[in-house]
Image (spheres, rainbow, N blue to C red):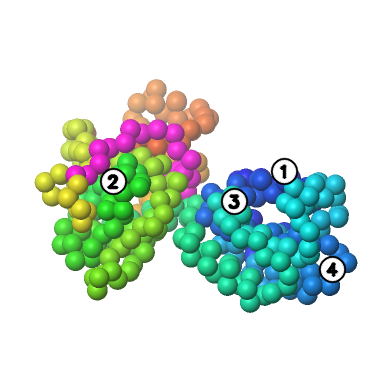
Amino acid sequence: MASSSQNYAEGSVLELTMGSAELDSILASASSRQQLVLLDFSVSWCGPCRMLAPILVQLASENQGRVVVIKMDCEKTAANQALAASASISAYPTLKIYSRGQVVETLRGANPAALRQSITNHLAQLGPAVNHNLALSLAQALSKVKAGCSFDQFLVASKTLAAYVGNIVNNPTEPKYRKIKLSNQSFQSRLGRLPGGRECLLQIGFQERTEAMEPVLVLDHVPEQLKSVLHLLQQAISDAERTRMGGGGGGEVTVAPNNPPASSPAPAAPPVAPGPSNVHASQLARVLAESMNVAAGADGSQAAAPSSTPQRQQQQQQPRKVLITPGKLARALAKIMHEAGFGSTSG
């Protein structure tokens, strides 16, 4: 049975045998990943269907990660027969293209050129694919920023990035929050000019374009994981600042309203309260630790520092499970930063 959590755009043609129930799971998975689904309704005795088969294989391979290609024999199972009937299939091959779970085009007959053009057109409308390792990719870009600047510069860059992300999360339908002019000197000094700075935004999904003869970064589609990434980023910054200041209060993650980083005059969004996250926290912690040459525990948490108290030593000897939460991950990040030589902690 298909699972909505699985990625089906793996470069090969899938065979559907369980009708609408299986198709619904595939459509849900593809929708969450900004992928198209191409479903070929065919039968074994159809000559044009057999002619089209190698074209489907090519399309699946050429569009790996972007298009789920499915072949369904309408006579093979009762479930397939029911799906074909509900879709009013009266000729073979009939091909349906789905975007965001809905049929956006139906083609009949074996016309490879028309099929390719339709796929190209609908992919352009769908936008870039969602990166399901968004936190991991962003962590790798941030490690480049950290390696190329001071701790204070790194905090400013991280806060600037969090401000952009926060504005987008809180105003997902406002285009002004999803566009950054590369001529914006505030952006360039805080983030853009730093090694890995622009890459952080590209990993989120921004694309470089030219509008009105001016280079800009534009985010067309807001990834579903962006809010979870914002939680981790804000908590990590807050804890890192408290660590550097010897336990003092953490600063706001957003940039001061009188000097916003965005091209628009709107103030930065307020911090979002930490909460449960579906981001791969263990992967994020390991990448950050590796980039800073600091060991991390097998569960993704920061390796425990030696303790001088017998009670603490006894606790460390007791096997226990560690639940990785955004807060714990942020504290691990702060510890990693400290051991990497950024800031100091109070005795």
Q: In the rendered view, does 145 fall on the left or right side of 34? A: left
Q: Is mark 2 on a helix, strand or loop?
A: helix
Label 3 CA crowd tier, 10 Å (few <14, some 14–19, many 20+): few
Q: Is 276 inside the magenta-drawn segment?
A: yes
Q: Nearer the viewer, residue 334 or 206?
A: 206
Q: Which amino acid, by three-letter code, is at mark 2?
A: Asn
Q: From the image, state whether disc 2 or disc 1 is nearer to you.
A: 1
Q: Which amino acid, by three-letter code, is at mark 3?
A: Gln
Q: Which of marks 4 and 2 is nearer the N terminus?
A: 4
Q: From the image, state whether disc 1 or disc 4 is nearer to you.
A: 4
Residue of label 2: 167
Label 4 CA crowd tier, 10 Å (few <14, some 14–19, many 20+): few
Q: Which residue: 59% across, 51% down?
A: 102
Residue of label 4: 46
Q: Earlier in the sequence, mark 1 or mark 4?
A: 1
Q: Which of marks 2 and 1 is nearer the N terminus?
A: 1
- Say which quadrant the N terminus sits in: top right
Q: Which mark is residue 21?
A: 1
